[in-house]
């Protein structure tokens, strides 16, 4: 697909992948490589190793008997570098990457004979009649990551930044529907990029003065609508600051339904207080879908039953996962039902705090089944301690 004159997207679509880096990808994903044709043929990234047939068939249709002169590697992770070795073997191309990218790729492929050019932050480099500027973006989301700016066409090849795990035959976000793509971009950011907010802010500052007419990420669809480009950059600025949103999220796992009753009471009280509230049952919802809502959350209410002296496994898994993602500045509270091990909730509260949430008050717990009086007290405590503060 020609994105702009002499700039092509080679989109290897992975329809079947259901899980990527531990979170659900029900819509699959794509691995986007980009070809710039000119005096020199320049390939930006490749694809995952098992997309070899699809990738090379599309590349061959674009270049025919010509060869690739340069391969720019924005990120050495295997979903982007998986076919670099085969491209270089076929065309004796020169590799362009960051210094850390060179280290990583040599460790991945153990090939010391490649011709490699390493670039520094802000460096401008002409390859034939095509001129690029490179911006090193360490920890967005690997130490080797960088973005590549095609100066004369005002295109930013953003690597994993601004991407989405979303497989489709359309190439542009506005062809799918910006609301869908923004939702998937938020899920991607929350589940992969959120721990690196400080690094993201530095990158946004670095590219802030660029004149950008298109953003071409390594996954998902391309941003070409100027309003969408402005909005996704603004969203990244907000997400990178870890600013809380306005929602109340109620997340629970229940054994016999008692904790569910408490969750439903929490939802009713949140709505009464004019909060936009959402409720998630961990028995049926994937944790990555819950994490996708965290950027919009102000308050998170976690509920669990007790099993073998511990909170239920999916709740424990969610809190462990959240500890690595480091959402901050959000208030939390806990609730749940138990049989005879009430002290087990101490560990529950500890896990919530270790996940980065502010928890100024101990939670509310009921033995066996909550009656109307217990639910009333739950509502009163929730209002006085959490919702109206």
Image (cartoon, grey):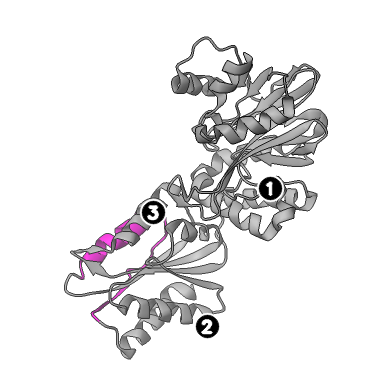
Give the Cα distance between marks 3 and 2. 28 Å
Residue nearer the viewer, 183 or 27: 27
- Residue on which the image places disc 3: 355
**Circle 2 — which element?**
helix
Q: Quadrant of the N terminus?
A: top right
Q: From this view, report whether residue 84 is shown above or below residue 80.
A: above
**Circle 3 — which element?**
loop
Furthest toward the left, the residue is 340
Q: From this view, report whether residue 103 is shown above or below residue 16.
A: above
Residue nearer the viewer, 61 or 264: 61
Residue nearer the viewer, 50 or 351: 50
Residue 136 visible in image: no
Q: Is residue 362 magenta?
A: yes
Structural crowding at the residue carrying mark 3, measured as other residues with C-alpha within 10 Å and reported as few (<14), some (14–19) or many (≥20): many
Q: From this view, report whether residue 245 is shown above or below residue 89.
A: below
Q: Is residue 237 magenta?
A: no
Q: Where does the magenta region start and end? A: 342-368
Mark 1 or mark 3: whose residue is earlier in sequence: 1
Residue 381 visible in image: yes
């Amino acid at each position: 697909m020609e994105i702009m004159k002499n700039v092509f997207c080679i989109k290897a679509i992975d329809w079947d992948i259901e899980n990527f880096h531990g979170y659900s990808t029900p819509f699959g994903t794509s691995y986007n490589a980009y070809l710039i044709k000119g005096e020199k043929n320049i390939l930006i990234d490749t694809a995952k190793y098992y997309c070899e047939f699809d990738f090379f068939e599309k590349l061959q249709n674009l270049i025919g008997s010509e060869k690739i002169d340069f391969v720019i590697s924005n990120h050495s992770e295997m979903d982007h570098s998986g076919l670099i070795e085969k491209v270089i073997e076929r065309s004796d191309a020169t590799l362009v990457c960051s210094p850390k990218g060179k280290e990583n790729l040599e460790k991945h492929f153990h090939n010391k004979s490649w011709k490699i050019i390493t670039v520094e932050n802000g460096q401008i480099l002409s390859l034939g009649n095509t001129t690029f500027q490179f911006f090193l973006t360490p920890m967005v989301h690997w130490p080797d990551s960088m973005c590549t700016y095609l100066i004369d066409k005002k295109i930013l090849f953003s690597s994993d930044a601004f991407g989405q795990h979303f497989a489709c035959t359309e190439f542009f976000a506005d062809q799918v529907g910006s609301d869908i793509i923004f939702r998937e971009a938020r899920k991607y950011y929350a589940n992969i990029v959120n721990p690196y907010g400080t690094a993201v802010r530095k990158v946004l500052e670095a590219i802030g003065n660029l004149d950008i007419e298109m953003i071409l990420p390594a996954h998902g669809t391309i941003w070409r609508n100027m309003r969408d480009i402005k909005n996704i950059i603004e969203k990244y600025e907000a997400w990178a600051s870890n600013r809380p949103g306005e929602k109340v999220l109620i997340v629970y796992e229940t054994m016999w339904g008692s904790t569910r009753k408490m969750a439903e009471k929490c939802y009713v009280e949140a709505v009464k207080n004019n909060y936009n509230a959402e409720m998630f049952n961990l028995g049926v919802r994937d944790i990555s879908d819950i994490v996708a809502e965290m950027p919009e959350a102000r308050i998170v209410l976690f509920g669990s039953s007790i099993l073998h002296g511990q909170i239920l496994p999916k709740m424990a898994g969610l809190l462990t996962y959240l500890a690595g993602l480091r959402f901050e500045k959000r208030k939390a509270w806990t609730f749940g039902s138990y049989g005879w091990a009430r002290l087990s909730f101490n560990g529950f509260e500890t896990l919530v705090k270790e996940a980065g949430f502010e928890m100024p008050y101990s939670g509310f717990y009921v033995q066996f089944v909550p009656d109307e009086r217990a639910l009333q007290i739950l509502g009163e405590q929730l209002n006085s301690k959490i919702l109206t503060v």
